[in-house]
Amino acid sequence: SQQGEEDPQALSIQEGENATMNCSYKTSINNLQWYRQNSGRGLVHLILIRSNEREKHSGRLRVTLDTSKKSSSLLITASRAADTASYFCATFGGSQGNLIFGKGTKLSVKP
Amino acid sequence: DAGITQSPRHKVTETGTPVTLRCHQTENHRYMYWYRQDPGHGLRLIHYSYGVKDTDKGEVSDGYSVSRSKTEDFLLTLESATSSQTSVYFCAISETYRGGSPLHFGNGTRLTVT
């Protein structure tokens, strides 16, 4: 059962531009997490934001959470070719016993 | 990177044969998980473990079994492999309860069932 749904499914930008990915979900959550997956590798945790938080930063990453709209966004500023990867949101809470992942946004950053 | 090793990294097997995938961690984390990743479906939880000999089913557990006899090892067994089980399998670990802390993933096992 999919909870989070990322938008867009694919995004192509030039190096130096900002990349914004969105995640919408259906039920109440305790936290929302963002992960990155490089081709052929496992997922890497980026940021966890709790339901009582609105914004978190980590380096060039900024995550926002709007629980009234049941949505989150991940902003990567000044993107680099090395940011090319798939990005997944995952939600936990409510009736969910475990973390549930969306299908991901595939980001391509062209040098 | 968290100390998680999956073996084998690649496997081709025939329909009807049993297959066991291994996940080994050096982090002493209590929680371990097996996910499968398929195009169009994202990551789906197969089974998870909350301690030695303590396991439970996830979203897509039919046709799979797991065992955890030591903290560091979590085995996934396909009892009789089918073509629908062709997938990339990821093991993950977490320090605290199931969604309350980040998951750390291994690099996956690509399984092809012919």
Image (spheres, grey):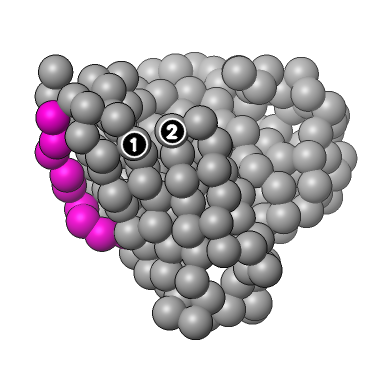
Q: Provide residue A53's location: percent of width, then percent of height.
A: 63, 63
- Residue stretch rendered in magenta on the structure: A6-14
Q: How far apart are marks 2 and 1 (CA)?
A: 5 Å
Q: Residues within 10 Å of mark 1 (few under 14, many from 20)?
A: some
Magenta stretch prevailing secondary structure = strand
Asked whether B111 or A16 is in front, the reply is A16
Residue labelled with disc 2: A60
Query: For the point 20% across and 53% down, which residue is it?
Result: A9
**Disc 1 residue type?**
Thr
Q: Quadrant of the C terminus of chain B?
A: top left
Q: Which residue is pictured at 43% across the width and 62% down the height?
A: A72
Is B104 rendered above or below residue B58?
Answer: above
Give the residue pinned by disc 1.
A77
> Which residue is at the front of the view, A6 or B13?
A6
For mark 2, give the secondary structure.
Answer: loop
Q: Check whether the beta carbons of the residues at disc 2 and disc 1 lie within 8 A of each other.
A: yes
Which chain contains the residue that carries disc 2? A
| Quadrant including the N terminus of chain B | top right
